[in-house]
Amino acid sequence: MDSFTPSTSRHHSDASSPPEDSRAHQPPGRVSFLKNLDYSVVQQCMHCGLCLATCPTYTATKVERHSPRGRISLMRSIADDRLKVSRTFGEEMYFCLGCLACVTACPAGVNYAELFEHARAEVEASGVLANPSRNLIRYFAIRWLFMDHSRLQLLGAGLRLYQQLGFQTLVRWSGVLRLFPKRLQELESITPDIQPDFSDDLIAPVLPARGVRRFRVAMLTGCAQDLIFSNINLDTVEVLTRNGCDVITPPSQHCCGSLHAHNGEWDLAAKLARKQIDQFPPENFDAIITNAGGCGSHLKHYSKFLGNDPAYRDRARLWDQKVKDIHEWLVQIGIEPPTREKSNSGESPRVVTYHESCHLAHGQKITSQPRKILQMIPGLKIVDLPESSWCCGSAGVYNIVQPEMAGQLLDRKLSHIRSTGADTVATGNPGCLLQLVNGARQQGWSLRVVHPVTLLAEAYRR
């Protein structure tokens, strides 16, 4: 081993280490996710600070523990038995957006995504944040609602009826919401509009390619995407068939498990991964398509959760290789560019800017492909967005559990969008779409927020 290879010992003789007898000890019978993690991952951070300027929470607070290197230092102290898993540690791990901008900035290649998920799993296993209301919410959302997509669709159908019959408008107009706690008022204000039809109603299970068949692909319809943006799923399927793909879209799909993995429920994430592999046998498809940046980042790492499962290990590795983001896949196979009709050639171009989903840009490293697709579409003028890869504050359920910080990030993002003069912003993740839609609505701004694949589908239809 050369002199530049870091030691993998868990106990160090540096002056900052407390005496051995003062170290925290692991409670008996509980698995430690951070202690069981490959220690080379824990100690890889050089504490150089190049991540600081890219971290939204550190930039906002200038508090060291709110930075990636500060959080990694806390994780390492727990792995080294120098700190106990405390409520403060748990709150810090959930104050992190998980946007992974630090991963892009890191010169040492620190796998912060892996550290982040292990740290949250450690928090949940320790129970330091447990309380009756939190336990009830987590059980309802993570262990019940998102474990069976039919339950989520049932909730969505009820919410759709509430909106279509005018009850939502009546409740908001009447002022009755003022009788409820402020937090409930804020949550009601960001209630998404449910689509008239879900993906199962819009998309046939098998759709043949238009023209020459080139590929056979599977289409993932998602959870929130299915309820709120099923029209994007329909646009995605149309674009795929127009580019030589037979598209298989099984009904009654399952959650991908990203919500569970990011919130420390690894057993449930692995269970959902097995369901996905069973429903979409990766050996049967040239590609498995996702159009949600956050989901895609998780979907490409099923082998991490199933690597020790002999029944699924090899299929999970194949699955990881087959999962493709829609932008990535279209650029990879080469697409038919839309053509402008002569009668429309004199129209002024629509000004469009592009906001990068954090997990699409930093998690999947897909940055150029969406822009290439947008540049192919006639009638668009693409303008650069300042801080295009800066988080909008959605970050899964972050805007629900950390509304103040999420609101600051949303205001910053909308300010940059305004500066471009664009009337349309494109982005490739349902959380970002919903966050920007709600933000523009609250500001009374008629900004169009749209998925790039929708703009491409519209151009084909013209």
Image (cartoon, rainbow, N blue to C red):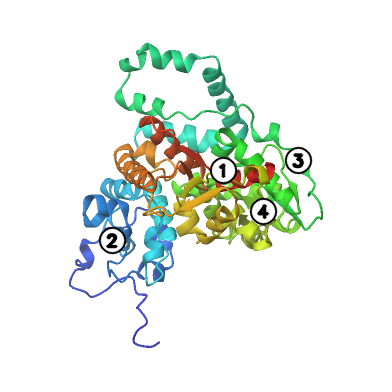
Q: Which of pointers 3 and 1 lies earlier in the amino acid sequence?
A: 3
Q: Which-is-in-front pick, marks 1 and 4?
A: 1
C-alpha span from label 4 to label 2:
35 Å
Per the model, the C-alpha gap separating discs 3 and 1 is 38 Å
Badge number at residue 436: none
Circle nearer the N terminus (2, 1): 2
In the rendered image, residue 304, in percent from the top left (x then y), is placed at 54, 60
Tell me the quadrant of the picture where the N terminus can be found. bottom left
- In the orientation shown, which residue stands out farthest toward the left? 15
Q: Dot 3: what SS? A: loop
Q: Of 13 and 372, which appears nearest the observer?
A: 372
Disc 2 crowd, CA 10 A, few/some/many (<14, 14-19, 20+): many
- Which residue is denoted by mark 2 in the rendering? 52
Q: Is residue 208 left or right of residue 405?
A: right
**Residue 366, image x, y percentages:** 52, 59
The residue positioned 43% from the left and 67% from the top of the image is 38
Three-letter code for the amino acid on which mark 1 is drawn: Glu
